[in-house]
């Protein structure tokens, strides 16, 4: 289907919805559903109508170029139209792109140390802090849910809930392997080591997104423990939930209340199950292509942080920034994320043509 055919289809559906809603005789549920579709479609339908109007003005102005008395005015009008038209066309095309239903959701962030021992754990802790600072800059709420420390300031694993506007839309391309190259503080010989940490960003799922049957869960309670296995409290408040159909296991022990730990564990479990469902759908939808900005697979190396050279390189779009300090405190992370979003949009626009 050509772009023009898609434009016409949207306009026709918008008119059809308007007439159906005006006609009445709809039950409350149908009226609410169609009203929402109409409201969602209205900005796009209006933009398409504006695009068609400007294209008609462009055709009219071109026709006036043959008239000596009107030529100067027509040329001025054409210059103005051709300055505005590309932006409007791009806006309409972007609005036509299929929406990721998870974009407006909050997110669960999971950071884990990969290869590299203590240095990988230290880097995982720094990445976790980078995302915390970035969340603060965006005005989001960042809540640590589970942190497994190594005892020297590193994290074996850290999980956080991030709440705010368009959290998942901004962070979804962060999933994958993040590699660090630097001289570890424990390295006496001054040699550069390469370590890695994995990041997973999952859309936070509501109960309506994922149904979890209680009989599919095994819930174990145990005593919380800190670094080195020391007991943190004397009650069995820590919770481990196993989802039997998938084998997914989630543990929470940060809270002193068993009830709160269970609620947090269920939030993480729901997000992981929702992501599994999304991944299955995405694999089906993207069977014929591999996105340049990455599949979000946690085993895919996406970025290198080279401290000696002060650079951060995102391998999916060949973007290098020589401002590692600003990236690590979250300030320059938007430059990378904006480039990834733009690349994703460009690729999807190319498929739309």
Image (tube, rainbow, N blue to C red):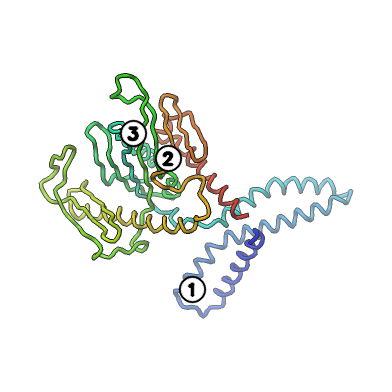
Q: How many marks?
A: 3
Q: Residue 11 occupies which quadrant of the picture?
A: bottom right
Compare marks 1 and 2 and give the one earlier in the sequence.
1
Q: Are marks 3 and 1 in contact (CB under 8 Å)?
A: no
Residue, far top: 189
How crowded pointer 3 is (Cα within 10 Å; few <14, some 14-19, many 20+) is rated as many
3D distance between C-alphas at marks 1 and 2: 48 Å
Q: Secondary structure at mark 1?
A: helix
139 relative to 275, above or below: above
The secondary structure type at the circle numbered 3 is helix
Mark 2 lies on residue:
301
Q: Position of residue 163 (x, y in %)?
A: 36, 49
Q: CA distance from mark 3 to mark 1?
A: 53 Å
Return the mark for residue 31.
Answer: 1
Name the secondary structure under disc 2. strand
Q: Nearer the viewer, residue 5 or 23?
A: 5
Name the outermost residue toward the right.
Answer: 68
Q: Residue at x 62, y 68 (%)?
A: 12
Q: Please state the horizontal and vertical placement of residue 124, each as a whole percent of the image.
A: 33, 37
């Amino acid at each position: 289907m050509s772009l023009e055919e898609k434009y016409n289809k949207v306009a026709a559906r918008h008119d059809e919805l308007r007439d159906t809603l005006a006609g009445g005789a709809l039950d409350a549920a149908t009226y609410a559903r169609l009203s929402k579709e109409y409201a969602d479609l209205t900005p796009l339908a209006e933009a398409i109508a504006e695009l068609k109007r400007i294209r008609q003005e462009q055709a009219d102005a071109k026709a006036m170029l043959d008239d000596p008395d009107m030529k100067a005015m027509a040329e001025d009008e054409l210059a103005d139209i051709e300055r505005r038209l590309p932006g409007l066309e791009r806006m309409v095309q972007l609005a036509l792109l299929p929406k990721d239903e998870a974009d407006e959701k909050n997110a669960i962030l999971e950071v884990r140390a990969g290869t590299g021992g203590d240095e990988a754990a230290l880097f995982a802790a720094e990445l976790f802090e980078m995302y915390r600072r970035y969340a603060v800059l965006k005005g989001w709420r960042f809540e640590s849910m589970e942190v497994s420390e190594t005892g020297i300031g590193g994290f074996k694993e850290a999980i956080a809930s991030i709440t705010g506007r368009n959290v998942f839309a901004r962070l979804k391309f962060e999933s994958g392997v993040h590699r660090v190259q630097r001289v570890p503080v424990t390295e006496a010989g001054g040699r550069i080591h390469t370590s890695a940490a994995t990041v997973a960003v999952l859309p936070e799922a509501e109960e309506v997104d994922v149904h979890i049957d209680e009989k599919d869960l095994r819930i174990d309670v145990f005593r919380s423990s800190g670094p080195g296995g020391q007991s943190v409290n004397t009650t069995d408040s820590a919770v481990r939930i196993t989802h039997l159909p998938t084998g997914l296991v989630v543990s929470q022990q940060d809270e002193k209340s068993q009830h709160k730990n269970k609620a947090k564990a269920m939030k993480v479990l729901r997000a992981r199950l929702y992501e599994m469902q999304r991944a299955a759908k995405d694999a089906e939808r993207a069977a014929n292509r591999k996105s340049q900005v990455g599949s979000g697979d946690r085993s895919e190396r996406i970025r290198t942080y080279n401290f000696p050279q002060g650079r951060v390189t995102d391998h999916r779009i060949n973007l290098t920034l020589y401002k590692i300090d600003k990236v690590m405190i979250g300030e320059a992370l938007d430059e990378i994320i904006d480039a990834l979003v733009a690349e994703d949009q460009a690729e999807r626009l190319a498929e739309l043509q």
